[in-house]
Image (tube, grey):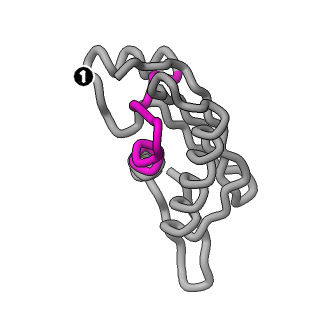
Amino acid sequence: MITTYFPLGTLSFSGEYFASLVGEAAKSCYGVAGMSTGCMTDSVKTLVLGSDFPEKGVRVTEQDGKLYIEMHIAVSYGVNVSSAAQSITHRVRDEVEASTGLKVARVTVSIDDIVEN
């Protein structure tokens, strides 16, 4: 849960909200085949919940009022990996800042898999 304090009150965002927001923004970028499991807990959740769940491959933390986003993705074969990562970084940063009003300090994109379509 990430809580922000405004003059008129507080606003709390759940981890699931950020995960779905970041995941959907990343999936809409060219060359992204899907989200990858980022850690062992994601791997276990994949076995239990199925292949796709909102927080798969996304971790959002808050420090000093700024967000740090870590993502694990799979890209399509033949895509320029550097361009895809840069596009995802910009898209996710813009989506999160526009939707929440919070500043994103860093977006880390880890490309864990290359998928052949």
Horizontal side, residue 43 vs residue 79: left or right? left
At 53% from the left and 72% from the top, the residue drawn is 10
Label 1 Cα neighbours within 10 Å, binned few <14 / some 14-19 / many ≥20: few
State the SS at label 1. Answer: loop
Check the image and report above or below for 22 versus 108.
below
At 56% from the left and 45% from the top, the residue drawn is 88
Pick whichever, 59 or 63, lies toward us: 59
> How far across and down, in percent of the image, does residue 33 sit?
40, 31
Q: Which residue is mark 1?
A: 50
Horizontal side, residue 49 vs residue 17: left or right? left
Q: Residue furthest bottom?
A: 8
Pick whichever, 7 or 96, lies toward us: 96
Pick whichever, 79 or 39, lies toward us: 79
Horizontal side, residue 38 vs residue 48: left or right? right
Q: Quadrant of the C terminus?
A: top left
> How far across and down, in percent of the image, does residue 35 sit?
43, 31
| Residue 65 picture quarter | bottom right
| Residue 37 picture quarter | top left
> How far across and down, in percent of the image, does residue 114 sit?
49, 19
> How far across and down, in percent of the image, does residue 14 sit?
44, 52
At 61% from the left and 71% from the top, the residue drawn is 5
Check the image and report above or below for 1 versus 110.
below
Residue 29 sits inside the magenta stretch: yes
Q: Which residues are magenta?
A: 23-38
